[in-house]
Image (cartoon, rainbow, N blue to C red):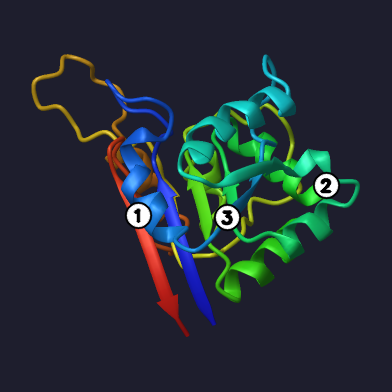
Amino acid sequence: MIRNLLLISTSTTHGTGYLEHAEEEMKNLLKGKSSILFIPYARPGGISHKAYTDKAREPFEKWGISVTGVHEYEDPTKAVQEAEAVFIGGGNTFVLLRNLYQNKLVKPLQERVNKGMPYIGTSAGTNVAGKTIGTTNDMPIVHVKTFDALQLVPFNINPHFQDPDPNSTHMGETRDTRIAEFHHHNRQPVVGLREEVCCVCTATG
């Protein structure tokens, strides 16, 4: 079993364009690939699947990789089964996970990734690569039947992680505090990804 994953905290950092900060890592992961399947299920409103796919298409086509949205296929499962690579963008993690289950894509994604298909996630797309979505920062704006995610890695992820600021006068909970609360009831590790960080996972076994 071979897994080729690129898990990114955010799609845009200060002073860069969409996905620009992770360009080299993406090119390395997708070396030899000519196409990628985009799953735009994470956006809860304000942008259509088509518009979100068009946004994702721009950087990839500059790199010589064509992009097709999974919503463009009559059979989403077949689209995943035939994809050279998959990219899941950011948005709301609860909306994304619900749509993945409703469209019966969880098992096909797991099977393809376990056979070596490259997987790229940003933000919510990174969250769902973990064991559960229990460490997302998003509001539960829709109900999901389970927090169990794709489980492509044996840990949870907290994108957009911020280190505690010792000079801050804000006395609310830090990300460290909230992850510690998670660990009071859950045993799996949690990886906090800062905004500029990409987690590259290439594993066999």
At 58% from the left edge and 67% from the top edge, which residue is drawn? 117
Say which element carries label 2: helix
128 left or right of 96?
Answer: left
Residue 173, percent from left and from top: 31, 29
Q: Which mark is first along the chain, 1 or 3?
A: 3
In the rendered view, tell whether residue 1 sits above or below residue 106: below
User: Does residue 84 appear to the left or right of 10 in the view shown?
Assistant: right
The x, y position of residue 76, in whole percent, is 82, 51
Kindly identify the residue that appears in the image at 36 percent across and 59 percent down: 200
Image quadrant holding the N terminus, namely bottom right
- Image vertical order of residue 117 relative to residue 124, above or below: below
Residue that numbered label 1 is attached to: 199
**Badge 2, how many Cα within 10 Å: few under 14, some, many 20+?**
few
Look at the numbered disc 3 and give the secondary structure of its residue: loop
Earlier-in-chain disc, 2 versus 3: 3
Residue 52 falls in which quadrant of the image?
top right
Q: Which residue is mark 2?
A: 102
Q: Amino acid at mark 2?
A: Gln
Q: Residue at x 50, y 71 (%)?
A: 3
Residue type at mark 3?
Ser
Of residues 36 and 178, which is closer to you in this image?
36
